[in-house]
Image: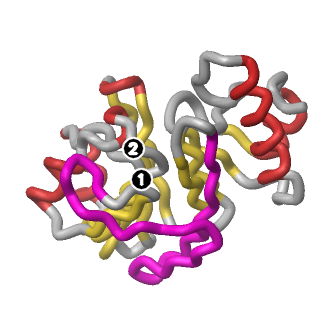
């Protein structure tokens, strides 16, 4: 299995392309923009986008859906029942998806404002905006950040420390690095 990162100027966000070493059906996570680089990654690796996973319904993570669906016949998976007017397959926490032979474990993270999903594929964790390298997302209030810190700490407490963290913004990290160096963990 291969994972490619596609950076978008739309919200300075990351999208991720995942597919088998041999090409074929693939997954895109949080496509903030369907740009030429992402199209080349898909085509040069003989992928066909069948599945779109959305961690949360913010434009920097969803705007590329419109273009993707004009090119590929893909299904959208999300905590919301629609994204940009497109119906989705609503996923629930604890769900184990098998998307074209790729096993995806779905975890939920609910804050006061919205419901977000975290996707685990092998030793990769796609966290959207809830956990990035050295931060716990973008909230204004101290109370919400404290609540988020407790939830994230409990969610990742027993997780393998070598799992890679792929956030919605910023560079990749690992569970170990976040537990050891993220000042926002309790």
Give residue 179's quadrant in the image. Answer: top right
Point out residue 22 in the picture as x, y percentages from the top left corner: 38, 75
Q: Is residue 126 magenta?
A: no
The span picked out in magenta is 82-111
Left or right: residue 122 versus residue 50 is right
Q: Which mark is residue 57?
A: 2
Frontmost residue, 139 versus 180: 139
Disc 1 element: loop
* Crowdedness near tag 2: few (<14), some (14–19) or many (≥20) residues, C-alpha within 10 Å: many
Q: Residue at x 63, y 41 (%)?
A: 111
Q: How many marks?
A: 2
Q: Which mark is residue 54?
A: 1
Residue 104 at x, y percent in the picture: 55, 71
Above or below for 124 versus 22: above
Answer yes or no: do the residues labelled 2 and 1 have beta carbons within 8 Å? yes
Q: Nearer the viewer, residue 98 or 2?
A: 98
Asked whether residue 83 is drawn in magenta, I would say yes
| C-alpha gap between disc 2 and disc 1 | 7 Å
Does 21 appear above or below 70? Answer: below
Residue 16 location (% of width, % of height):
43, 49
Q: Which residue is rendered at x = 59% and y = 46% of the image?
A: 127
Judge by depth and name the residue closer to the eye, 2 or 130: 130
Question: Dividing the picture into quarters, in which one does residue 43 lie?
Answer: bottom left
Task: Name the quadrant of the C terminus.
Answer: top right
Query: Which residue lies at the image location 74% right of the left edge and 54% below the top edge?
Result: 163
Residue drawn 87% across the image and 52% down it: 157
Which secondary structure, mark 2? loop
């Amino acid at each position: 299995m291969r994972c490619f990162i596609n950076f978008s100027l739309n919200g300075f966000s990351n999208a991720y392309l995942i597919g088998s070493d041999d090409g074929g059906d693939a997954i895109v996570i949080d496509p903030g923009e369907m740009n030429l680089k992402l199209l080349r990654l898909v085509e040069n690796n003989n992928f066909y986008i069948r599945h779109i996973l959305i961690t949360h319904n913010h434009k920097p993570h969803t705007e590329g859906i419109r273009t993707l669906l004009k090119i590929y016949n893909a299904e959208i998976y999300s905590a919301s029942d629609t994204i940009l007017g497109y119906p989705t397959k609503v996923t629930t926490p604890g769900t184990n998806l098998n998307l074209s032979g790729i096993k995806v474990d779905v975890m939920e993270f609910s804050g006061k404002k919205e419901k977000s999903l975290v996707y685990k594929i092998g030793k990769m964790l796609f966290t959207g905006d809830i956990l990035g390298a050295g931060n716990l997302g973008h909230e204004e209030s101290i109370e919400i950040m404290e609540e988020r810190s407790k939830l994230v700490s409990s969610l990742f407490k027993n997780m393998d420390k070598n799992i890679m963290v792929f956030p919605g913004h910023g560079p990749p990290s690992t569970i170990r690095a976040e537990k050891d160096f993220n000042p926002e963990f309790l």
